[in-house]
Amino acid sequence: MRFLDGVNVTYVKKSEKEKLRKVLSEVSKLNTDLSFQPLNGPLYGSYRVELYEVDEEVEKTPTIKLTVFVSAVEPIDWLMKHDDQVNMSLDEVVHVADTEILEVSEKDSVLSLSLEQHKIYAFLSKTKTANMTLREMVLEVLKKFFRDEFGIEFSEEEYDLELHPELSDYFS
């Protein structure tokens, strides 16, 4: 498994954006300030999407996510040694605090997703995403995320979408 990129994604449903604009316009006529912080949902959202590539011919797709506690005598040294996302043995884990079974769909370009607060971990098929741009990959992730999380289809035409990638040079 290989890390591809991290992307901050913000979306607003276009029909809701117009409603918000009207409300804010009315409030501004009253010389009043209004602060608006929407919750993540199908109308508005701001997520961090972490893209990981899985080469299905060589490796298996992750099926379980663990939150673990590790005991290390020298924690900084331990982190520096393991910071490159190397595989580690489970005998280094002191306590498993949480588990999540990941649903895998080998027929899709997005093999699996895991949501953690405002972060989406996406495991992508290397063969099915080989010729995709970063934007295309993120759109596939959003489509799967909306189906799984909200039970609706995501349509790019219905949303104002902003992507802020970390490693955009990788996809140039």
Image (cartoon, rainbow, N blue to C red):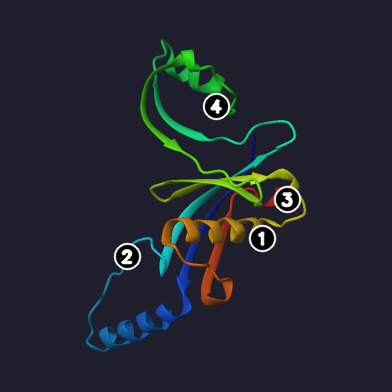
Dot placed on the residue nearer the N-terminal end, 1 or 3: 3
Q: Could you say which disc has been placed on residue 83 in the image?
A: 4
Q: Pointers 1 and 3 in contact (CB under 8 A)?
A: no
CA gap, disc 1 and disc 2: 28 Å
At label 3, the amino acid type is Lys
* Residue 128: mark in rendering: 3
Q: Position of residue 7 (x, y in %)?
A: 56, 52
- The vertical placement of 158 against 10, above or below, is below
Residue 160's spot in the image, x, y percent? 52, 73
156 horizontally vs 22: left or right: right
Residue 52 left/right relative to 128: left
- Badge 3 marks a residue whose secondary structure is helix
Q: Does dot 2 land on a helix, a strand or a loop?
A: loop
- Amino acid on which the number 2 mark rests in the picture: Gln
Q: CA distance from mark 2 to mark 4?
A: 33 Å
Q: Which mark is residue 136?
A: 1
The C terminus lies in quadrant? bottom right
98 relative to 50 in the view: left or right: left
Q: Amino acid at mark 1?
A: Glu
Tell me the residue that label 2 is attached to: 37
Residue at point 47% right, 78% down? 14
Answer with mark 3 or mark 4, whichever residue precedes in sequence.
4
